[in-house]
Amino acid sequence: MTAPAGSAPPAPADIPPEPGGVPAREPAHAGPAPAAVPPERRGRTDIPERVVARIAAQAAGEVPHVHRVRERGALTPGGTQAVVHDELAVLELDVSVDYPVPLRHVAEEIRRHVARRVHDLTGLSVGHIDIGVTDLVPSRGDDTS
C-alpha cells in the first residue's frame, strides 16, 4: 500500500507493530543537516607526543621485514620518539630488520607507511623520520651456522 503523493508521514499510532507485538520505530526524518561549526570554534584537540610515538611504532611494525620496533621506556634510552610543533611531527624510530633485506628499501617503506598512518590517525603532517637500524634478525629459513 502506497500513500498518495503529498500526504504526511504516518503518526506513531498508525505505524503497525513489528512481528512479536513490538511497535515499530518512527521513520527517520530527512530534514536539513545542522550547520557545520567552523574548526576554530569547535575547540582544540591536543595529541601528546607519546601518543604520536606509539602510533608511529605500531605503524612501523606493520611494514614487511620489520622484525621489532623499540619503544622508549622510562629506563631505556632511544627507541621511538616524537616531537610535535603545531601541526608538524618529527619522528625517530629504532627498528630491527630481517636479514637479508635491502635496508634502504625497508627504511623508505617505513617512512612512507608511518607518515601516512600518523597523518591519517592524527591529522599531523610528518616533517621527517630518522630511522636507526639497531639489529638484523636472520630469516627463519636462513641458517648462518
Image (tube, helix red, strand yellow):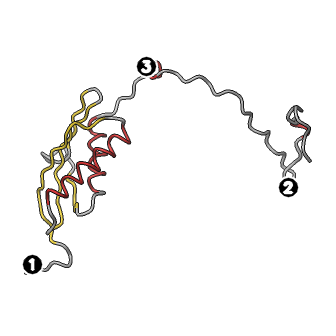
- Separation of marks 2 and 3 at Cα, in angstroms: 49 Å
- Name the residue type under label 2: Gly
Q: In this view, does 76 lie above or below 50?
A: below
Do the numbered discs 2 and 3 sit on residues whose CB atoms are within 8 Å? Answer: no
Q: In this view, does 71 lie to the left or right of 17?
A: left
Q: Residues within 10 Å of mark 3 (few under 14, many from 20)?
A: few
For image coordinates 28% across by 26% down, the residue present is: 86
In this view, 109 is above or below 85: below
Q: Quadrant of residue 3?
A: top right
Query: Which of marks 3 and 1 precedes in the sequence?
Result: 3
Q: Are discs 1 and 3 less than 8 Å apart at CB?
A: no
| Residue labelled with disc 3 | 40
Q: Position of residue 115 (x, y in %)?
A: 28, 44
Disc 2 crowd, CA 10 A, few/some/many (<14, 14-19, 20+): few
Q: Give amino acid for label 3.
A: Glu
Q: Which of 77 and 126 is in front in this view?
A: 126
- Which labelled disc corresponds to residue 20? 2
Residue 131 percent coordinates (x, y): 15, 49
The alpha-carbon separation of the residues under discs 1 and 2 comes to 69 Å
Q: Residue at x 22, y 60 (%)?
A: 66
Secondary element under disc 3, as helix, strand or loop, is helix
| Residue placed furthest toward the left | 145
Tell me residue 119's x, y (percent): 34, 40
Q: Distance between the residues labelled 1 and 3?
A: 59 Å
Q: Name the residue under label 1.
A: 144
Q: Which amino acid does label 1 sit on?
A: Thr
Marks 1 and 2, the one that precedes in the sequence: 2
Q: Is 123 on the left or on the right of 7, as rendered? A: left
105 left or right, relative to 51: left
Where's the C terminus, which quadrant? bottom left
| Secondary structure beneath label 2 | loop
